[in-house]
Image (cartoon, grey):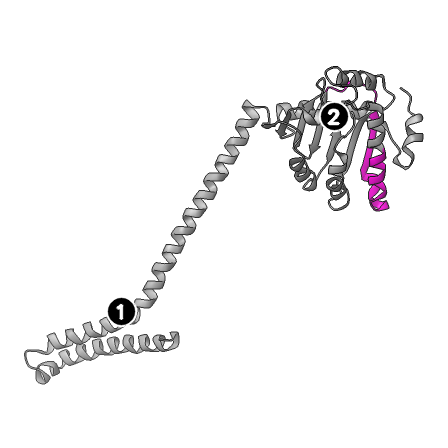
Amino acid sequence: MSSNVRYQAERIALALMAVSGIVVLLADLFGWLDALAPGGALPKVTLLILSTVTVFLLLEIDRLKKLDDVQAQLSRLDGNLQAQLSKLDIDVVARRLRQEHYGGLVRVHRRFPEEVFIGFAEGAGEEVAILQTWIPNLHHLKQALEKAIVDHRVPVRIMLLHPSSPVAGLRDEALRTVRDPALAADVRASVEGCLAGLAELRLGIRAEDRARLQVRVYNSLPSIAVYKADEHFLVSSFLHGQLAIDSTQIEIDGGDTVMGQEVQRELSTLWSIGSDVDLRDWRASIRTISL
């Protein structure tokens, strides 16, 4: 039954009920009920009214059923809302516990998780920063760094060891101590190769975006290797006999956590003592930097 037909039927039924009530009242007042149906008028009128009410209720069954469906949907929505709020509360509690008891530590990776950092860098909205002696896996990260610079207009800061620093020789020795020298990386050559890769990255982006790629070299003993994207940090140590990216990586979430603040201080310290490298001619730029 269409809604218009149902609406008209309901109005007719309600009108009949109202008119019946008035007619019965008048008929009873003038004594017509007893004249028309002596002794049985009241039951008949009552039956008439009840029948009309029944018809009206039958017409309303579909609408009442829809109300039940709406109530069921509201119940499901309420359950989903409660579940989401409960999850939100759990996430807030978990974050607070990480800050209070673990200093921001999220997890520990066996080696550098490239896909994790690429995801962080590609979604960065504030800053990407890398502190290393050199970046052995730069070729895997170039696309993510370019996306951060060009698409998200995020500054990318790179801090590398000066290739002529005495520390380069010490790191060479540390890498060769427990490895065959033929397998060990030449630190100076590796830093220079990384600078060449960064210069190539700079050439591949638009001129107006190149200023967001900033590179500095430092002449100091590095304490940790850091890969940062916004409030996410991946931190490792310079162990003997292996590259930092092959060492255990600590993932930290939150620049306001205990560990996050310490790592950020180290980044700021190395950046402050570093010297800018002009990637337009990095070789000449390196030669002008005094140690």
Are there few (<14), some (14-19), or many (20+) residues within 10 Å of tag 2?
Answer: many
Q: Residue at x 15, y 74 (%)?
A: 47
Element assignment for label 2: helix
Q: Is residue 142 magenta?
A: no
**Viewer-nearest residue: 150 or 53:** 150
User: Which residue in the structure is indicated by mark 1?
Assistant: 57
Spatial CA span between label 1 and label 2 = 76 Å
Circles 1 and 2: CB atoms closer than 8 Å: no
| Mark closer to the observer (1, 2) | 2
Q: Is residue 131 left or right of residue 256?
A: right
Q: Quadrant of residue 270?
A: top right
- As drawn, 185 above or below 81: above
Q: Is residue 149 left or right of residue 71?
A: right
Residue 284: give x, y in percent of width and height: 94, 30
Report the number of discs: 2
Residue projecting furthest to the left = 39
**Viewer-nearest residue: 226 or 82:** 226
Mark yes or no: residue 168 visible. yes
Per the rendering, the mark at residue 66 is none
**Viewer-nearest residue: 264 or 277:** 277
Residue 153: give x, y in percent of width and height: 76, 43
User: Which residue in the structure is indicated by mark 2?
Assistant: 267
Q: Residue at x 54, y 29 (%)?
A: 96
Q: Quadrant of residue 265?
A: top right
Residue 273: give x, y in percent of width and height: 82, 22
Mark yes or no: residue 274 visible. no
Q: Earlier in the sequence, mark 1 or mark 2?
A: 1
Q: What segment carries the magenta color?
A: 196-223
Q: Is residue 84 left or right of residue 119?
A: left
Are there few (<14), some (14-19), or many (20+) residues within 10 Å of tag 1?
Answer: some
Q: Residue at x 45, y 39 (%)?
A: 86
Q: Type of residue at label 1?
A: Leu
